[in-house]
Amino acid sequence: MTYDPVLRVRRFNRAVTSEVGALDISFLGRGRPLGAARVLNSIGQGQSDVAVIRDYLGLDSGLMSRLLRSLEEEGLIETVPNPRDARRRIARLTETGRSEFHAYETLSNARAKTFLAQHPQPEELLRAMDIIASSLGRDHVVLEEKDPRHEDAKYCLSEYYAELARRFEKGFDVSLSRDPGARDMIRPRGAFLVAISDGLPIGCVGLKGSGGEVAEIKRLWVAPSARGLGLAKRLMLAAETAARELCIKVLRLDTNSALPEAQQLYRRTGWNEIDRFNDDPYPDTFFEKRL
């Protein structure tokens, strides 16, 4: 017997609503509801444009105005015209607001740690949460160009190398591979793109250039929790856009038959299989695409 999927989703929704305190008039005991706390958190996390915050939280204009007004009346924020566009407004924390933001951060972190500590399989729980967060936040994933030595990039690359080590029959040692070469994945030679989901890196791709008209796509990776959502294709298209900006005419890449989903993506998006073009010991399939 299998219970109705709709009933299971609704059970999950009720559990989350209760756990996060969505119905409380005093979220985490700080004297204001969750909506106001989320707006305060967004500003504290560095977002300032009121329209961007509203869209990020999925609030209508009327509710956003009421929440901002309540925070202003408490002396936690101030809103002023955007100096670059007087039609828009920006919000920033006051000194009192910064103290309140940090109080929420401390309470929220403690609550999260307690929640995980109570579960017998916290890693399994986190994996399930990652899948749900990636699915619900798929429309808010942003691609950011970063130095490949940035912490977000290094995290993605370490996860990528670890996955290859698991999936390749003889394992994977990056020191035996053609190293990405950080200097070749930074403009004006190349670029490195990281997919960010609400502050966390969930994917990457590198464009390794030489200063000429030919470059390589390297290190395409998407977190397991975000696969099937079109992110790999989006990363590849962004890499192609960066290549065009750098006047690159031909892109090449190599892959391994242990990664059939990658090969399917390349063939579906206009890449053509070619002869081997390097002496890397790991790849066995090679592709090219003319821009």
Image (cartoon, rainbow, N blue to C red):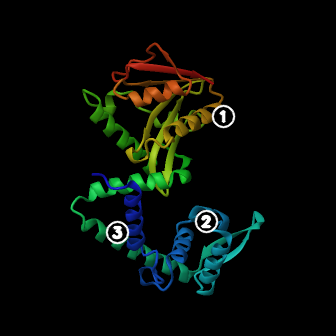
Label 3 residue SS: helix
Return the residue at label 1: 245
What residue is drawn where x is 46% and y is 74%? 22
Contact between labelled residues 3 and 2, with CB atoms less than 8 Å apart: no
| Location of residue 200 with respect to 108 vertically, above or below | above
| Residue 53, numbered label | 2
Q: Quadrant of the C terminus?
A: top right
Q: Earlier in the sequence, mark 1 or mark 2?
A: 2
| Location of mark 3 (residue) | 112
The local secondary structure at tag 2 comes to helix
Q: Mark 1 near mark 2, Cβ–Cβ under 8 Å?
A: no
Q: Within 10 Å of the Cα at label 1, are there few (<14), some (14-19), or many (20+) other Cα atoms?
A: few
Residue in view at x 37 percent, y 55 percent: 4
Q: Amino acid at mark 2?
A: Ile
Q: Position of residue 212 (x, y in %)?
A: 60, 24
The residue at the point 44 percent across, 79 percent down is 103
Task: Confirm whether residue 160 shows in the render.
Answer: yes
How many marks can you see?
3
Q: Nearer the viewer, mark 3 or mark 1?
A: 3
Q: Amino acid at mark 3?
A: Ala
Q: Which secondary structure, mark 1?
A: helix
Q: CA distance from mark 3 to mark 1?
A: 43 Å
